[in-house]
Amino acid sequence: MNEKVLVQGYDISDHSAVVIGCGGLGTNVAVHLAGAGIGKLCLCDFDTVQMRNLNRQFFYTPADVGKQKCELLASRLRLYAPDVAISSVSRQIMCVSDLSFADEAELVILAVDNIEARRIVNDYCKQQNKPLINGGVDGTFGTAYLYVPGMCADLEEAGLLLKTNRRPQSQSPVVGVIGALEAKLAVDHFLKNTDAQGRLLCFDGIETRALQIQPRRGDEAT
């Protein structure tokens, strides 16, 4: 048992999650979940480390440029949290069937800036009745959202699949805040704290606010 978990007073070692995207958001989500003592963590990304992203992807170094992100992150998190079963999948999400590796996980966490990938993962989680956490950052603004099928609006209904005019660079501290919020939503979900589900957490660089997203009537829990 991870000693940190006992000190913190909670245990999530029987739970599992998939993190899709191992960039700025994904590295933050993964390190917080590993540190919290999650039982199983799967990391998915098809991309390689690039120099221009190192300011907010802190688990990588200039010597890692050109290497697969998910494999590097998994290997370093195993050193950080040896009690956590950590795996990696180097794969680009092009269709729902590409997500078969997530079938056994309790929770999917999105840490990507690709709208189409978000749409595919949203469809997959609706089909599989699987909870989904989404995070997004644009400059000094960011959001985090927990979707639980049958209980609240999915990403499309919440307006999280709309294309926006993105700023050229997101601030590293904001990426850290949103990644931490995603991890917090995951821990709360594992601990059966339902307060945040269906609430869009918005950080504007100064404060965090929560907006309640109302599902369509036919999608509400019965």
Image: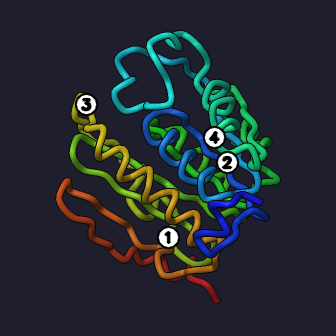
- In this rendering, the label closer to the viewer, 2 or 4: 4
Separation of marks 2 and 3 at Cα, in angstroms: 26 Å
The answer, for residue 93, to whether it is visible in the render is no
Q: Which residue is mark 3?
A: 169
Q: Nearer the viewer, residue 84 or 107?
A: 84
Q: Which residue is mark 2?
A: 18
Please state which amino acid type lies under the numbered disc 3. Gln
- In this rendering, the label closer to the viewer, 4 or 3: 4
Identity of the residue drawn at 43% across and 31% down: 57
The residue carrying pointer 1 sits among few (fewer than 14), some (14 to 19) or many (20 or more) residues within 10 Å by Cα, namely: many
Residue 117 location, quadrant: top right
The residue carrying pointer 4 sits among few (fewer than 14), some (14 to 19) or many (20 or more) residues within 10 Å by Cα, namely: few
Identify the element where label 3 is drawn: loop
Q: Which residue is mark 1?
A: 153
Identity of the residue drawn at 61% across and 69% down: 7
Identify the element where label 4 is drawn: helix
Please state which amino acid type lies under the numbered disc 4. Tyr
Identity of the residue drawn at 44% across and 31% down: 58
CB contact under 8 Å: marks 2 and 4:
no
The N terminus is located in which quarter? Answer: bottom right
Q: Nearer the viewer, residue 146 or 48?
A: 48
* Residue 18 rendering spot, x and y as whole percentages: 67, 48
8 lies above or below 123: below
Q: Is 144 placed left or right of 103 in the picture? A: left
- Colour scheme employed for the rendering of this structure: rainbow
CB contact under 8 Å: marks 1 and 3:
no
Please state which amino acid type lies under the numbered disc 1. Ala
